[in-house]
Amino acid sequence: MAATQRITAGVAVAAACAGALAGCGTGDTGAGKGAQDEGAHGAKKAVGAPAPKNRVRLIGDGSTAFTGSQPRQPRAERLKPGQRPPQFVVFSWDGAGEDSQRLFSHFRKVAKDNRATMTYFLSGVYMLPEEKRDLYRPPQHSPGRSDIGFNDEQGIKDTVKQLRGAWLEGNEIGTHFNGHFCGSGGGVGEWSVREWKDEIAQAKSFVKSWKTNTGTAKGSPLPFDYDKELIGARTPCLEGQTNFMKAARQLGFRYDTSGVNDQVWPKKKAGLWDLSMQLVPVPGRGFETLTMDYNFMVNQSGTTSHGDPAKHEYWGDQMRDGLLKGFSRAYKGNRAPLIIGNHFESWNGGTYMRAVEETIERVCTKREVRCVSFRQLADWLDAQDPKTLDKLRTLKVGQAPKRNWASFLSGRPAPAPKGVPGAPAVKR
């Protein structure tokens, strides 16, 4: 996948709220009234609430803080015998940051309007100003090198504001690492386990020291301990997964989403939940492609900026309809979670952003659908009976149980049809 566009200085916004962290939630997070209601993703009851002021404990230079349990998290409950599983959908964003396009803030609103939470994979260098670029020492590259550039102080403050609000709304903050090096010549596919650990440590450090690196004395911290918040990632260009997973497992990560899967129920790989993106139909074409804006774009225009403007609307519709086809065959079939990945981009006139937004609006409010973060999906999977998950994995792409969900997951054999050998006699 191509690198996310470099973060640029955006239009000035109101300064981030200063003082007590609890005040930052007012009018920005959507938490508060209704936070304990049914709300999020169809779960019975969300748990957690905005932390009181006396629970804010600054970490390090005050760039981050411990504020208690994350608000608006659904309770992960084990399926009852015979219960049909919910349809999970994960929308995730590679290299998440706020720039002049304001797509981070836009999709936060889209998520809130449609009862969804998401995962934002933050690129660590988006928290590092250009003039401090030499603080980044990428594996197999010279200090200060990055294939996606760095940020400026205003861009960092804008991104911090969005990260803060997103987390308080129940979204997850993961990582897309730092310099986004792909291919040969020092790309992430060539990194050792030790080098991956170093890259992860640097990604954390840039988040945990954004105030020092920008010279910010005031301003509210990010409301989480990033060492505990960070439990999963997607590697640049989906490369280097094997060694990354070895490093991630040793660092206590819980999932990876750097591979390619069919739409079947996930399982653990090398100790982590394999929550990779999946293949879905490309309407009008005889093949399937990955559930990501970049992959649809490559199969349509092959370029991020020079596609035929007359085809932009068609290409966006094609992506939207492909995602909806993938959703429908899972929703009506095996109920496997649908994993979708994107970038905050404007390729081909922004048509893919429209496609994703329309997909969110059409699926996240449906009955028994939960649009969740990767963390929330991993929590739910961990809460299930392993035997139930094994049974779900026997269903192929789009395959529903032969009889019904009640008999398929009842934990006991289905009754024999009447009138066949071995069935109880029918009383007249």
Image (spheres, rainbow, N blue to C red):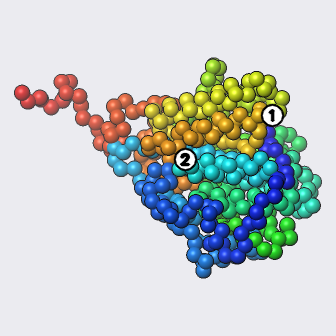
User: 420 left or right of 349?
Assistant: left
Question: Closest to the observer: 344 or 94?
Answer: 344
1 or 2: tag closer to the N-terminus? 2
Residue 152: give x, y in percent of width and height: 86, 58
Give the amino acid at mark 2.
Asn
| Quarter of the figure with residue 390 | top left
Is 386 placed above or below 292 here? below
Label 2 neighbourhood size at 10 Å, few (<14), some (14-19), many (20+)?
some
* SS category of the residue bearing label 2: loop
Q: Residue at x 81, y 47 (%)?
A: 180
Front: mark 1 or 2? 2
Which label number is shown at residue 114? 2
Q: Residue furthest bottom?
A: 54
**Can you see residue 196?**
no
User: 41 left or right of 29?
Assistant: left
Query: Which quarter of the rendering shows the N terminus?
Result: top right
Task: Give the total of numbered labels.
Answer: 2
Q: Residue at x 47, y 36 (%)?
A: 331
Residue 146: give x, y in percent of width and height: 87, 50
Residue holding disc 1: 304
* SS category of the residue bearing label 1: loop
| Quarter of the figure with residue 422 | top left
